[in-house]
């Protein structure tokens, strides 16, 4: 059976690949998921697909192969990479993830506000892939979505 997938979207350098790596490692620690291979769970798209409007359709198409879309926003970025109400273009649940909250110049409230303007009504997680802040909560969310290993 095919496992549910998670589509990662976000601007260039938002931290998509770093977060994916951290979650794949942490899932071993927090969820004891040695038996479950999460490596194929994430669909990690280049940031250009979000930053260049004529590629938007690639993200929309990719979402049909996903159970959920994770929209990442760098907490140090003041400009919103998402067009208004972008989340409503997806026929899948979209959650928000504010990344790099460890950074000195981070402004997580601005990032979360931008994600809300992008039409995200679901949960918004604040995380640092560097320090691990917020990662256990996100790992649990992920496990709820893609399942725990079989006993
Ligand atoms: N301080 C800090 N830097 C991060 C964090 N996550 C990613 N980065 C850095 O941000 C840069 C871009 O990350 P990357 O995962 O390649 O972004 P992507 O383009 O969205 O895949 C890299 O230099 C990462 O080391 C974080 O939580 N904290
Ligand atoms: Mg990347």
Image: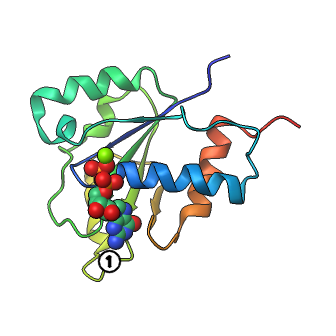
Q: Position of residue 144 (x, y in %)?
A: 67, 43
Horizontal arrangement in the rendering, residue 131 relative to residue 72 (left or right): right
Q: Position of residue 33 (x, y in %)?
A: 73, 46
Q: Residue at x 20, y 65 (%)?
A: 77
Q: Position of residue 96 (x, y in %)?
A: 40, 52
Quadrant of the frame with the C terminus? top right
Q: Residue at x 62, y 38 (%)?
A: 145
Looking at the rendered structure, the secondary structure element under dot 1 is loop
The answer to which of 27 and 146 lies nearer the viewer is 27
**What residue would you read off at disc 1?**
103
Q: Quadrant of residue 35?
A: top right
Q: Residue at x 21, y 46 (%)?
A: 82
The answer to which of 71 and 91 lies nearer the viewer is 71
Up/down of 131 relative to 53, above or below: below
Q: Residue at x 73, y 53 (%)?
A: 31
Horizontal arrangement in the rendering, residue 132 relative to residue 56 (left or right): right
Crowd class of label 1 (few under 14; some 14 to 19; many from 20; radius 10 Å): few
Can I make out residue 111 in this image?
yes
Q: Quadrant of residue 112?
A: bottom left
Horizontal arrangement in the rendering, residue 119 relative to residue 92 (left or right): left
């Amino acid at each position: 059976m095919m496992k549910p997938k998670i589509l990662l979207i976000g601007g260039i350098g938002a931290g998509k690949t770093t977060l994916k790596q951290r979650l794949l490692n942490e899932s071993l620690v927090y969820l004891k998921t040695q038996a479950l291979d999460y490596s194929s769970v994430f669909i990690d798209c280049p940031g250009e697909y979000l930053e260049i409007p004529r590629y938007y359709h690639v993200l929309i198409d990719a979402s049909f192969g996903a159970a959920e879309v994770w929209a990442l926003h760098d907490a140090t970025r003041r400009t919103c990479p998402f067009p208004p109400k972008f989340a409503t273009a997806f026929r899948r649940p979209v959650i928000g993830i504010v990344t790099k909250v460890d950074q000195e110049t981070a402004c997580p409230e601005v990032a979360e506000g931008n994600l809300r303007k992008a039409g995200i009504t679901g949960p918004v997680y604040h995380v640092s892939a560097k320090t691990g802040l917020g990662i256990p909560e996100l790992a649990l969310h992920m496990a709820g979505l893609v399942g725990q290993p079989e006993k």
